[in-house]
Image (cartoon, helix red, strand yellow):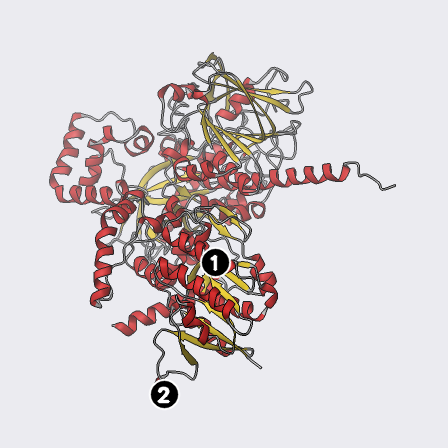
Amino acid sequence: MKQSVLVLGAHGFIGRCVVTTLARSDFATPILGLRHPASADARPSAIEERRVDAVRAESIVPALAGVGCVVNCVAGDMRTLVESARAIVDAARQSEQPVRVVHLSTMSVYGSTVGLVDESTPLRADLGPYSQAKAAAEALIAAYPRSVVLRPGCVFGPGSEQWTTRYARLLTAHRLGDLGAAGDGQCNLVHVADVAQAVLCAVRIAQADGQSFNLAIPEILSWNEFMSRFAIALGAVPVRRLGGRRLKIETRLLAPPLKIMEILGGKLGLRGLPPPIPPSLLRLMAQDIRLDAQRAQSELGVRFTGVDQMLTETAHWYRQQVASRQ
Amino acid sequence: MIEDALQYDADRTLTADVCVIGAGAAGITLALELAGRGVDVLLVESGGHKADDRTQRLYEGAVADERMHSPPHRYRQRRFGGSTTIWGGRCMPFDEIDFESRPYVGHSGWPIDRAALLPFYARANQLCEAGRFEYRAGEAFHRPLRPVIDGFDSQYFTIDGLERFSCPTDFGARYEHRLRASPRVRVLINANLTDIRLNAAGTAADSLVLRTFAQRCITVRASRVVLAMGALEIPRMLLASRSIQSHGIGNQHDNVGRYYMCHVAGTIGTLIQDGNVDRVWHGYDISDEGIYCRRRLQLTEQTQRRLQLGNFIGRLHHPRITDPAHRSAVLSALQLAKGMISYEYGKRLHGEEKLSVSNWLAHLRNVVTGPHQVVGFGYHMLRDRFLAARKFPSIIVRSPAGRYSLDFHGEQEPLASSRITLDSACDEFDTPRMMVDWRYSDLDVRTVRESVRLFAEDIARCKIGRFEYDPGSIEFEMTRYGAYGGHHLGTARMGDDPRTSVVDRNCRVHDVHNLYLAGGAVFPTSSQANPTLTIVALAARLAAHLQAEATRERSSISTTRPVAVPT
């Protein structure tokens, strides 16, 4: 008999992929936990939807009926990240039947740490409110013994705005490229399908409880190499070398107005505005942190997609998206 | 971590697993690669972060014939980053034939072949920021390129070989943040090596003596020492360190400082094309990775063997700049602006020729007749060179008349008589200065003469036009500016036989078990290729060797350690 898995944040980029992967598996049945579920006859698929406000335990408890596992893919502001983690744990504790929790965290919890980082590395969480919120959420989840924490690097693949579409747009506009020393940091890419696969494995393997797992490709890949290879796959050539002067103009002069435009554009429904390159992005690309994901491979059995395949397929998807909009 | 020895308030003794002397292309590569392999490194640099006249003067020395060789403090930089701070950025690997022992090239043959270096060339390309290790146009470009000379078909030359251009990468500026961040690297700047002290048996480097301008003395004791100071400074230090071996370290067979090579290079002749069509593309092609690449004519290995010549390449080039007969406004403007161009680049651009008043006026007339060309060129250089992070590598000027000269760069045969010795004068630290006596051979002249002749034949046979040159001027043109500046090679050559070489195939000084050399000094032959890429590849190879040795040593210590037997 298949296990019912409640997915919170199921409409997000990772959540959608997790739901699809679970639905294809032979041992899990996904249930979408949504704030506003569609009526049964208006649903795009046969997947069950339940009404859930992910930041309130009392809203989650009823949705846990018959559920063996909750997957937390909730995104949002800092408060939402922390409160949803607290609510999920509270609800799981109140549940009539035992419930496991698989929590999607992030490499940002390691903060400014550099070097090879495995799961035993202390969480510095010193890269601003997001890393603090994710670390706080992790701490709440980790206090619940039947939980698994996944810490993906930069989740790449079709549909990823942050690590795919944004980079594709900046590369095709030649606003990113080879950054020299500023792009020497390690790019801990992980394909969204591999993240979903890791979730599936974590749902299946109860012995993973109480553990955390880094998720990133095993290859050593700097941001410069990633951007150069992705740009070539996109046909955004020749790749441009950008010096410090140009990067200062981007982050100090252009980023603030572009960010304001992005926020206003979002509210007005405007698409295609040039994305900003915030200083935080440059900081990340210079950070020499390398996630060691050996534990995910050996204990969860995750197999990571190769870089070439990831870049080629995603570039193809992006070109199709661009063509379909024209 | 980066420390400044000038800040030391007392003499010190430092210890290290590996101490590398010289933070240029080879030294920084070694430090990065060793640290990446888990080996602790002390990287010592004489200079600081900026050029400093007092430090640079330590490079001064004498030259036997000033027409044949620049003063030794030119084309070298004694500072963090070394001579990469003024590097032009041209990258290309050595060819297979360069490693072979060729009966017609005296003292030729490396103890390793190209395959031994190949795994490290890719890494060298990365460190030099020259893109992928692809040196054939067909590999690097997946689109048709404009022919270099349309209709040129030669049995003597290949024409799809590439040279790739680094940014050019100043290794100091580019990799300082990595060295600073690495817990395995300690960089010490403003510390000058003044003596290498061997143990009493002369079999190991016992300590290094460093001195500062603040009168501090720093003693370094390291398990292994690598000298990566360039091919002029290495023989100077080996010869000057005479406390145990009276003729200098590694010099039992009088090989240190000998076989000094640069390259033979020059510009000759005029290609005059038939008809009104310009069939020449002598500029750069940009690869998908954004790397400037340039194709060149290269003498095939078969032709080299058949005619018993050294390695040789040529590129089409603008006419000689000093002669206003080229009628190019841009070239004349460059001639008039010669005072603004650095010595290292200006020397081969405009030479040190004294121009007559009439020639100056003729140049001025050229500029006046083409001001828009000068402005366009100025904008191009401003945008693509001075302001660009990846710089347009050189001056490319199309000839209005479709006339081009041949810029050549050839292998120099190693000669025992071409050498670095110690001069009687000393520098500020009482280390003897060097005397440079650079010589070239008949083979060098013949290589250029025959190659130019074959090129002229090909141009005529392919009905492209004619290549006019004076065969009698070959030797004059190849020595017009003397030895090619900056390519200092061969002064502590690599070989299996201690009687004819200074270091073994792993760059270890024969008989001094913990002293290694890195850089162009160990090259037994010079190839046609600019040396930096191979210097970096050899340094990466040496780092792999040192790490393997350290690992072997550790494991042998652990296996020989007494084990407690349970009773």
Asked if labels 1 and 2 touch by Cβ distance under 8 angstroms, the answer is no
What is the quadrant of the C terminus of chain A in the image?
bottom left
Q: In this picture, is B103 found above or below B50? A: below
Q: Is residue B539 visible?
A: yes
Q: Residue at x 24, y 30 (%)?
A: B340
What is the quadrant of the N terminus of chain A in the image?
bottom right
| Subunit that carries the residue with mark 2 | A
- Expressed as whole percent of the image width and height from the top left, the position of residue A120 reads 55, 51
Marker disc for residue B423? none
Q: Quadrant of residue B326?
A: top left
Marks 2 and 1, Cα distance to the nearest angstrom? 37 Å
Q: Residues within 10 Å of mark 2 (few under 14, many from 20)?
A: few
From the viewer's perspective, is B99 left or right of A324?
Answer: right
Marker disc for residue A140? 1
Q: Amino acid at mark 2?
A: Asp
Q: Residues within 10 Å of mark 1 (few under 14, many from 20)?
A: some
Q: Which residue is mark 2?
A: A41
Q: Residue at x 51, y 56 (%)?
A: A219
Q: Secondary structure at mark 2?
A: helix
From the viewer's perspective, is B201 left or right of A239?
Answer: right
Q: Nearer the viewer, residue A2 or B542?
A: A2
Q: In this picture, is B29 found above or below B214? A: below
Q: Residue at x 27, y 55 (%)?
A: A276
Q: Quadrant of residue B74?
A: top left
- Expressed as whole percent of the image width and height from the top left, the position of residue B15 reads 58, 26
Q: In this picture, is A312 found above or below B211? A: below
Q: Nearer the viewer, residue A153 or B195?
A: A153
Q: Is residue B134 visible?
A: no
| Subunit that carries the residue with mark 1 | A
Q: Amino acid at mark 1?
A: Leu
- Expressed as whole percent of the image width and height from the top left, the position of residue B72 reads 41, 23
